[in-house]
Amino acid sequence: MATSTDLQSLLKRIEKATTRLEELATKRAESAPGGDSSPSGVDLATPNAGAESKVVLEYEAAVQPQIAKFVSYSDKIGGIVLEQARLVEALYQAQRSFIRIATLTKKPTMDQLPGLLGPQQSAIQQIIALRDANRPSEYFDNLSTIAEGIAAFGWVAVEPTPVPYINDMKDSAQFYANRVLKKWREKDENQVEWVKAFLSTLRELSAYVKLFHTTGLVWNPKGEDVEKAARAINGDATAAGPASEASACGAGAPPPPPPPPPPVYTGSCETGGPASAGAATRGSLFADLNKGGDVTSGLRKVDKAQMTHKNPALRANSGAVKD
């Protein structure tokens, strides 16, 4: 017959085993991709609601250090290069807020989405416009590197393959990045580091999205209404009703589901070719959610001979760096 001491010992062992199982379950949930992106009982009144979500913190850890390096190297170049870098920094902040909203809310309807994407779309358009307004500049290749690659941040509007989309945009940026290296490698080491910093930003962004948003941005099925969350985080001015949001982005009737990611645009990648057409298409990524199948009109694939990672001869001639 078991004694009181034996029973107490058994209870302690059971308690320890239970505690250990709970710890393992918690660690497994935290390590799962997007594991805490769908918390229940969202309290929008809490200061910094959503800011401590794992997907937000991991976004900061992956992208912010690269952005900081990129801005630092841009500051040494100065002028319009620094001005464009500040816009990239603003885009990062806007996307961080957007991901934060996604952790708190249900997936928005297609007529709500354009208004939420507005700050990111505006930053991308300004980045591209700055390049187009400074074609005579000696830093045109720098400006074009960013203008060609910045659409990678449009992954938030791409389903179901955002990672390949980011990588395509990175490949597009590589063309002008190689021209920067060819021009400045022997003159200014800071330019080499500048190129590495931007390409590393896109690489880390791709790795983050692959881990947490493999098939598209993860929303919270148990979350609040998206407009309420946007008001709580950004203020009433940036969370207007769906009708005003849609009209601000040129939307009419509710659009069809978003199209697949557009192919790489080569208008600005051909030597001596015009860059504005491709830039306009990249800058309109979010607004093009309303165009359905027409979004890919006028686009064509980059020839493999123009892709540094597929053409060893081009890579050798351009002096490309590994990011």
Image (cartoon, rainbow, N blue to C red):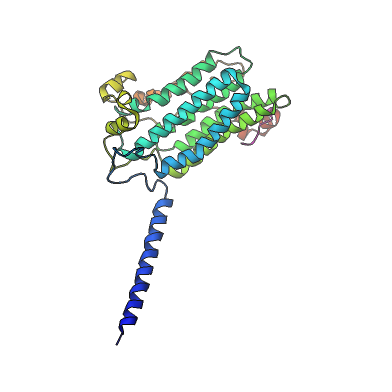
Q: Which residues are magenta?
A: 318-323
Kindly tell me whether residue 149 is visible in this rendering.
yes
Residue 250 pos. (x, y %): 33, 18
Residue 301 pos. (x, y %): 52, 27
Residue 22 pos. (x, y %): 37, 61
Kindly tell me whether residue 269 is visible in this rendering.
no
- The residue nearer to you, when weighing 65 against 182, is 65
The quadrant of the rendering that contains the N terminus is: bottom left
- The residue nearer to you, when weighing 25 against 321, is 25
Q: Residue at x 52, y 17 (%)?
A: 130
Residue 188 pos. (x, y %): 70, 25
Q: Residue at x 44, y 33 (%)?
A: 155
Give the overall secondary structure of the magenta segment.
loop
Q: Is residue 65 left or right of residue 236?
A: right
Q: Residue at x 57, y 30 (%)?
A: 70
- Give the number of marks: 0
Q: Is residue 8 magenta?
A: no
> Is the residue 170 above or below the residue 2 in the image?
above
Q: Is residue 85 left or right of residue 46?
A: right
**Snapshot quadrant of residue 257:** top left
**Snapshot quadrant of residue 222:** top left
Q: Residue at x 38, y 58 (%)?
A: 25
- The residue nearer to you, when weighing 78 against 114, is 78
> Is the residue 71 above or below the residue 14 in the image?
above
